[in-house]
Image (cartoon, helix red, strand yellow):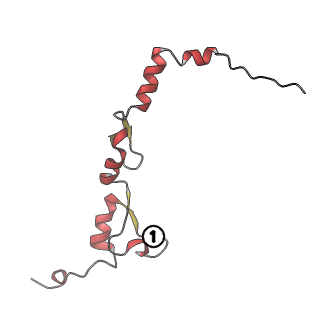
Amino acid sequence: MRQYVSRVLPSKASLDLLTPARAHSRSQKLCRFRFLTCLACGEQYRAGFRNEHLDVCSGAIVVCPHGGRDCLGPRDSGRYARRDANKHANELCPNRPFVLSQWLPL
């Protein structure tokens, strides 16, 4: 039985990876300070600060603070984009706390 030894010889493609232009391009792709565009809201943020952006992203999905995931039934699951969550929590949510001053005439 013959055994074949695989030899890895440097190809032209692997040598191209070592050029300064390729090294610069690769470092830019890995840089945590490069700008990325958020798919949820369209704003730009730095790549290394994704979690900080998600804390304030208007397109991030949040859960209803009053009804949780059961708010408005299983179809809607009580999840809303952050930009719509305040309107839901203050006006539309059937589980929102009752405020007496809303119903008393002044």
Residue found 39% across the figure and 44% down from its top: 38
Q: Quadrant of the C terminus?
A: bottom left
Q: Is residue 19 above or below residue 75?
A: above
How many badges with numbers are in the image? 1
Left or right of residue 19, residue 81 in this image: left
Q: Which element type, helix, strand or loop, lies under badge 1?
A: loop
The picture quadrant where one finds residue 81 is: bottom left
Residue at the image position 29 percent from the left and 52 percent from the top: 56
Say which of 99 and 17 sits in front: 17
**Quadrant in which the N terminus appears:** top right
Name the foreground residue: 1 vs 53.
1
Q: Whole-percent x and y of residue 3?
A: 83, 25
Looking at the image, residue 22 sits to the left or right of residue 5; the answer is left
The single residue placed furthest to the right in the displayed view is 1
In the rendered image, residue 70, in percent from the top left (x then y), is placed at 43, 75
Residue drawn where x is 37% and y is 54% of the image: 59
Task: Report crowding for label 1: few under 14, some 14 to 19, many 20 or more residues within 10 A (C-alpha).
Answer: some
Image coords of residue 34 (percent x, y): 36, 33
On screen, residue 4 above or below 88? above
